[in-house]
Image (spheres, rainbow, N blue to C red):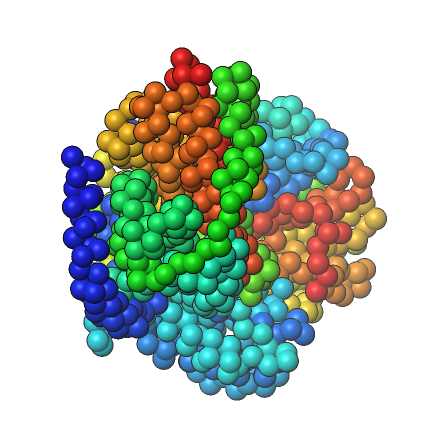
Amino acid sequence: MLLRKFLPLACIPLLGSVALADEPARDQLQPNAPQSLLLDITRAGDALVAVGERGHVLIGKDAIWQQVATPSASQLTKVFFLDDKLGWAVGHDATILHTDDGGLSWVKQFEAPSRERPFMDVLFTSASDGMAIGAYGLFFTTNDGGKNWQEAFHDELLGEEDAAYLNELKETDPEGYALEKASLLPHFNRIIRLDDGRLLMVGELGLVAVSSDGGARFSRVNFDYDGSMFNAIEAHGKVFVMGLRGHAFAAGLGLDDWQQLSLPVESSINGALVSSKGGLYLVGNAGVVLAVNDNAEAELVARRQGENLLAGAEDKQGRIWLVGAKGVFALDSAQTK
Amino acid sequence: MLEKLVNGFESFLFRHRGWVITLFALLTVFLGYQASQLKMDAAFVKNIPLNHSYMQTYLKHQKDFGGANSIMVAVEDTRGNIFNPEFFDALKNVHDQLFFIPGVDRAQVKSIYSPSTRFTEVVEDGFAGGPVIPSEFVNDAQGLEIVRDNIEKAGIVGRLIAEDYSAAMVSAQLMDFDPQTNAPLDTIAFAAKLESELRGKFETDTIKVHIIGFAKMAGDVADGAKGVVLFFLIAIAITAVMVFLFSRSLVLTLLPLACSLIAVVWQLGLLTVVGFGLDPMSILVPFLVFAIGVSHGVQIINAVRQRVLDGQATKAAAASAFRSLLVPGGVALLSDTVGFITLLAIDIGIIRELAISASLGVAVIIFTNLILLPVVISFFDIKTKEDAGRAERAQAFWKPFSVFANLKVAVVVVLATLGLYGLGLKGAADMKIGDLQGGAPALHADSRYNQDTFFITDHFSITTDVMTVIVEAFPEACTYHDVLERIGEFEWQVGNTVGVESTASLASVARKVNAGFNEGNPKWEVLPRNTASLVQAVGQIPTTSGLLNADCSVMPVYFFLKDHKAETIEHVIAKSKAVAEKLNTDKVQFKLASGPVGVMAATNEAVAEAQTPMMLYVYGAVFVLCLLSFRSLRATVAVILPLYVVSTLAQALMAKLEIGLAVSTLPVIALGVGIGVDYGIYILSTMAVKLRDGMAVQQAYLEALQERGSAVIFTGLTLAIGVSTWFFSALKFQMDMGILLTFMFLVNMLGAIIILPALTALFWPKRR
């Protein structure tokens, strides 16, 4: 434990394993990995890549799932692929992993367990430029493909009172300033790139913000629900945001005319995907799978009893796979409500 | 000298025949009264090896976490959906009723009706939660809809609610002692209560009650064991017919049967005297005692009859039979007794009880059938028809058998035996320790109990096949991230073993609670590194969850297995040991193993460990006794080698029939050897005298056969028939024991009349 305190926050990959030296001996590749908690899934070339607890990464090809080794035991919350090969996965202990072979092998680009907070999403706009976001306004950027990561502080997303309070501290109490700065911002849960190039970020306490300069500065949009938003997606010419307790909203590309969707469930909505046929699906806690039509009307199409669902992706053959508390499964095998 | 002693004893007995009979009559009345006080008794602790390190762990933490003695009641709606008022009424009734049955630890009764079954959910401004069945619950469509939502939020599907919502669970822990009377829990009465108070009262056309757990199983076993009385009567009837065919005399039929029954009465009476009850597991002992008694009785009447046919008066014939059979019979019965006493080496109460009750039973046969029987016979005047050709006919009958003592044939027999032994050894290597079938091994697969077990394993993610590994740490250990991380890692790695269906620990539950504190977002299902957050998460978990003790220095990890087959247990235990070794630190120790599977693992290990010493003791005892009575190493080896071959073949048979070496089958080997040696002793004791006198082996064998051969074959058949009635027992373990004992008795008999003479021929090669 002592050792970790003296480690620099930005770790090079090798040091990462040193930092975990006092952790119990791991045995990462395990038969139950495909049935254990998985938090995200995405398409990478011909394969699907899913990530989850204990640093698990699974590769799915032709409906067969295989676990691959990673240099991390921290829970991975999100995986992103820029193309068939280049991908990043982020998670707890501020872990950032990188692959350049479609997910078969991974290296650790960044890790900071002592920060005690997770990354929740990662987005790259090119092979060099990317950002990783997370809890309490955690925001790191890179412009060299993740070799180096720099922290950014988006104080423009603070509330007016918080901003004033923080400014005052900065003068009077530098130590308190550092502490408060680290916890005043809401959790950043999801960042997506809209078709027109703008970035949309959603998060805790009704945070919905947009950036037109590649993520340098964000501005909150006019949005009047103050529960957490966990996800966002662009579909049917609209932007959808969704989150706590069955709250989902849609707006036009102007992002100023939010309409709440009437969902038939009260479960939190965690994930969304648009199928190749253009269908929009939402998945969430209590195993709900909803289909949303062009008129933004939602219908419950499947339910996995007592099993929180996190995300979904479509494979090469057009089959939709979902991940959640009990691992990965095909939507067509899910029991209907 | 021995001869002198026997002769002196004989004249003393036969001179005071009246007193002898009176003494036996008084003893029989006394012990008969004691036997009538005998109770069925099946305490849980008797079934476990208390000194095994797993059981030390189990006993040490039993108070905090309950033990392995649990009961599960699944209430099923046969229409497939529990959400109707009728079902919820029934479930509530079952919960309340179970709560009030004496012996149930009321603090540990768990169902959706217990107030401690709570749900939590996340709302915009924090947490909301409450009991799954709210206090204002109204049993109607609306109320049930609320409960249905709460069940989802509480995450109890698979544990308290069937995965397909067709049943709900009420579970409880039992106490070993009644807290009011401090008397040990009467397991069998408790099981009867479950049947009458739960199933009897609440089962309807649409509501089915499934009950499993040690107590229920013991009750069902006891019920099944009562069927044994019928088998006992059948065995007596068959034996009576056989003895009559053998002796052709009503008196000589009734007397050995009566004496053998007296032996049974004494044995049962002595059990009460030494303070035992009759355990369903050892209910077969009276059978054995009866059968062994008859077989020795037959030797006596055979000897008496032959002497009467030779023209002696009955009294003289009885006295002479007594003289000639007291030593071989006594040695044979003593080796039986010693064979059973060796079972005491096994540290499992129930096997020790079996050892004591069986050795008592066999020892009393020495009195009832070797002493009382000839004395009683001497009062009668046995009339047998003069049968001139008898000796010639017997000789003609036995002549073909005597070739086994011919050296050339003997070589073939011994080679064939070696071949058989080789095959047996190969087969015996496949013999498995423990239970090989799912469900309760004592009962048949189609018994109600096992059907209930299969229902519960099919519909719930939990079973009674739970292994608990206890994590012993230091006070407040659960507030340390690395401790919980270590526990979680142990749970995860062992959970990945084939045979583990699901797991639970403080670590995995704390992860879920942490997600709860973070708006129910599964991305926060981690053990927070931040101490305040970790304490907040762990603080939500009450000690009643069974996941931690009051100062969280002890935290169990639960593994729910798919069954308790020996292979499954071995696998999971081996993995647990390996992972524990890897993860143990000075301050955090993973201790195997509590829960029913921990008990079974310890039992399996105790049985496996006991096997070799038990065999050594039983063979050692038989060896010494034979050596003493024959005073010949060659003769001793000739008796023991066939026994050993047969033991090996029996093990191969067990492997073939998928009968595992378990608490119920372990004694069979010792019993089989102990009783099997009788044949060899009877035959060789006659032969040895003749060999010492210089007779050729084949002739000595022929004469021995003429004198005792028919009694030996008869004995083998009687014993085999007695135990073969067990094939039809409602209890699987009785069936297994029946099969194995029948095999041991018959094949040992064949060994004594085929292999033994062949070995003798090889050992005395010059006597031709």
Which residue is at 50% across, 20% downward? B406
Nearer the observer, B256 or A99:
B256
**Residue B113 in view, yes or no:** no
Counting from the top left corner in percent of width and height, residue A221 is at: 60, 57
The quarter of the displayed image where residue B397 is located: top right
Nearer the observer, A304 or B674:
B674
Horizontal side, residue B526 vs residue A212: left or right: left
Which residue is at 48% across, 66% downward? B233
Nearer the observer, A165 or A71:
A71
Nearer the observer, B6 or B550:
B6
Which residue is at 61% across, 69% downward? B166
Counting from the top left corner in percent of width and height, residue B151 is at: 53, 69
Which residue is at 45% across, 45% downward? B711
Please determine whether, in this image, residue B93 is positioned above or below residue A199.
Answer: below
Quadrant of the drawing holding the N terminus of chain B: top left
Horizontal side, residue B64 vs residue B169: left or right: left
Counting from the top left corner in percent of width and height, residue B760 is at: 41, 23
The quarter of the displayed image where residue A126 is located: top right
Counting from the top left corner in percent of width and height, residue B518 is at: 45, 56
The quarter of the displayed image where residue B592 is located: top left
Please determine whether, in this image, residue B571 is positioned above or below residue B220.
Answer: above
Outermost residue, right side: A277
Please determine whether, in this image, residue A42 is positioned above or below residue A13.
Answer: below
